[in-house]
Image: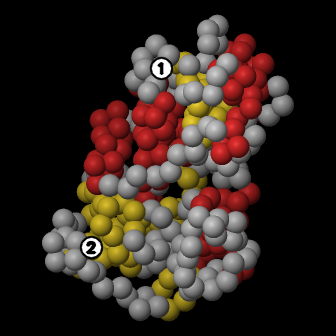
Amino acid sequence: MRAITFSAYGGPEVLQLSEVPVPEPGPGQVRLAVRAAGINPLDWKIRNGSKRQNFQVSFPHTPGFEVAGVVDAAGEGAEFAVGDEVFGWPETGGYAEYALAKALAPKPAGISWADAAALPVAGETALRVLGLLEVREGETLLVHGASGTVGRFAAQVAVAQGATVIGTAGSRNLDDLKSLGVVPVLYGDGWEERVREATPGPVDAVFDAAGHGVLPGSVKLRGTKDRIVTIADEAAYELRIPYSGPEQSREVLTAIVGWVTDRGVRIAQGKSYPLDDAAAAQIESEDGHPGGKLTLAIS
């Protein structure tokens, strides 16, 4: 099968389109014919070696943490059968024509392959952090990076739960946030004062999905370090602020599907690249302003 691999840490040029053996599913696993794979910042952070202390990989390595596709083969005890359309987290890299997986859920019929592949990471992260923050109806939540895939999902859920959501973003995304019921605030210098002007009361909780040095200012706004969580700023360790990591399960995916199918929560889609253009997709992701979720269209 075709797969993207890299055999040394480095820039996007280390990514190669390779011919590798088709994997065989073990007990509880299925093999997917991958239709779409999500692009995430963690993909290129692993590729460039900046995450090597936390994410050890064996070379050659195939990137990719989220996929959508059709079950092609099923191991003993697998929860899905050949022909099922599913999405979730692969156990082998998602930048490939086939991938093995266990943590999957049925793909909603009305959702495209690209939309399904965009859901696992953003949806799981958003729901997990909102749970940690215990955001309640009537409270005010500040979301840094509210126009990104994670922040946008979290903002929509929090609005639906009855919270007032203040979301920081770039100027081109402020109108989109306003259309979602979010109070938009321009990020960058002076963001703290703009947040204070946007809400007459206190900020009850802070979700940092951006990681651009906003934690100290967030502590000032809160007046305390409690109910602040980041998924993007490793300064959290020095500040003793929770840095949250993922939980991958079918139950989580089912909860995500509920928000999408029943409550209309959506991820803004960016560009879809062919598999052999994965390096360009990572370059756009690394640039930091993709304008929506980036995906690979594989077959």
Residue 299 in the image: above or below residue 220: below
| Residue 211 shows in the view | no
Residue located at (64% from left, 38% from top): 240
Q: Secondary structure at mark 1?
A: loop
Residue located at (73% from left, 77% from top): 10
Q: Residues within 10 Å of mark 1 (few under 14, many from 20)?
A: many
Q: Secondary structure at mark 2?
A: loop
Q: Residue pushed farthest right?
A: 189
Q: Position of residue 295 (x, y in %)?
A: 53, 62
Q: Quadrant of the C terminus?
A: bottom left
Residue located at (50% from left, 16% from top): 139
Task: Say left or right for 239 vs 63.
Answer: right
Q: Position of residue 269 (x, y in %)?
A: 53, 50
User: Residue 29 got which mark?
Assistant: 2
Q: Position of residue 138 (x, y in %)?
A: 46, 13
Residue located at (58% from left, 45% from top): 243
User: Residue 89 got which mark?
Assistant: none
User: Residue 163 got which mark?
Assistant: 1
Q: CA distance from mark 2 to mark 1?
A: 39 Å
